[in-house]
Image: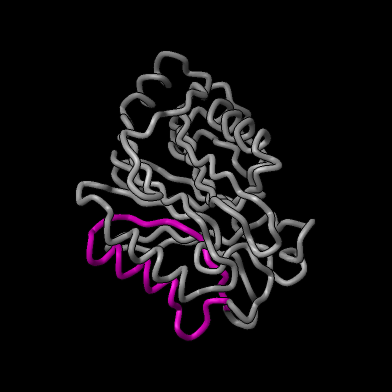
């Protein structure tokens, strides 16, 4: 499976500039790509000003839907959404034919996110795509292993990929890399972590460190990089082989 990760600078509060920037990157996506992943709050940056939420115009959501429709490629990323008087950090997975979303459950209590946004209620949002099952999570969720816990249903693990879209500061990059690796190993799955780069409006620095990790905790190397786009060719059959050779998943706690 060919996966593209968009790791790039995001300009806080500048919807128009971010919209143009991501549109230009998406226009460059190679045709044989099957799946594109964007960072958390890619249209606004990680902010707590709900006046920038996706409301009537839905610019970010339209960008994702138009891309999925025109290219036939799945796209994933999060946006601030206003719905029924509530504001949510909503992580979307959109294909040409279907649309899924996960509302962030663990809101970052060290910022105003937890004060102005509403928590999601559903922990297990799992997408079926290209014969793979994909679980969606967002940034701070990474610190809570119960939320990511893989389980067995009908004698198979309930997901194969665990995806975190994030705005994770450089000052905590060791935790980012360590926890992503742990989640891949303990859940015997591929883990995708997608993070932003550069400085935000508060001069917080982001180092990117986007990655794909296999079920043995090994970081996969991109096949190539093109102007903030990292491409990976992921051998999904290797996960099946790994699970057969070392079926630790059969002994998981099913709680």
Q: Is residue 147 left or right of residue 116?
A: left
Q: Quadrant of the N terminus?
A: top left
Q: Is residue 174 left or right of residue 65?
A: right
Question: 154 or 10, which lies in front?
Answer: 10
Q: Residue at x 42, y 29 (%)?
A: 220
Q: Position of residue 45 (x, y in %)?
A: 58, 64
- Above or below, 192 against 69 in this view is above
Q: Position of residue 49 (x, y in %)?
A: 67, 75
Residue 97 at least partly seen:
no
Q: Position of residue 5 (x, y in %)?
A: 40, 47
Count of all numbered marks drawn on residues in the image: 0
Residue farthest along the left direction in this orientation: 31
Give, as a single range, the part of the protein colored magenta: 53-82
Res. 50 image quadrant = bottom right
Assess whether residue 79 is covered by the magenta stretch.
Answer: yes
Q: Is residue 183 left or right of residue 163?
A: right
Q: Residue at x 44, y 39 (%)?
A: 161
Question: 26 or 33, which lies in front?
Answer: 26
Q: Quadrant of the C terminus?
A: top right
Q: Residue at x 58, y 27 (%)?
A: 186
Residue farthest along the bottom direction in this orientation: 56
Q: Position of residue 240 (x, y in %)?
A: 36, 25
- Above or below, 123 against 132 in this view is below
- Above or below, 244 against 63 in this view is above
Q: Is residue 201 left or right of residue 54?
A: right
Assess whether residue 8 is covered by the magenta stretch.
Answer: no
Q: Residue at x 43, y 36 (%)?
A: 160
Residue 18 at least partly seen:
yes
């Amino acid at each position: 499976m060919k996966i593209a990760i968009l790791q790039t600078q995001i300009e806080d509060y500048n919807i128009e500039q971010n919209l143009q920037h991501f549109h230009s990157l998406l226009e460059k996506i190679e045709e044989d790509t099957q799946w594109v992943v964007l960072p958390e709050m890619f249209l606004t940056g990680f902010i707590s000003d709900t006046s920038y939420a996706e409301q009537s115009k839905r610019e970010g959501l339209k960008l994702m839907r138009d891309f999925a429709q025109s290219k036939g490629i799945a796209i994933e990323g999060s946006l601030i959404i206003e719905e029924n008087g509530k504001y949510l950090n909503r992580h979307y997975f959109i294909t040409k034919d279907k649309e899924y979303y996960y509302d962030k459950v663990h809101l970052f209590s060290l910022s105003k996110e937890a004060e102005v946004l509403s928590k999601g209620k559903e922990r297990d949002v799992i997408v079926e795509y290209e014969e793979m099952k994909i679980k969606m999570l967002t940034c701070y969720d990474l610190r809570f292993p119960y939320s990511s816990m893989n389980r067995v249903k009908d004698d198979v693990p309930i997901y194969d990929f665990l995806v975190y879209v994030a705005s994770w500061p450089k000052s905590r990059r060791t935790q980012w890399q360590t926890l992503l690796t742990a989640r891949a190993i303990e859940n015997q799955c591929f883990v995708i972590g997608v993070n932003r780069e550069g400085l935000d409006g508060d001069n917080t620095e982001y180092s990117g460190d986007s990655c794909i990790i296999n079920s043995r905790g090994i970081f996969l190397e991109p096949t190539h990089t093109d102007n903030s786009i990292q491409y990976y060719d992921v051998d999904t059959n290797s996960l099946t082989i790994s699970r057969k050779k070392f079926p630790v998943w059969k002994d998981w706690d099913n709680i």
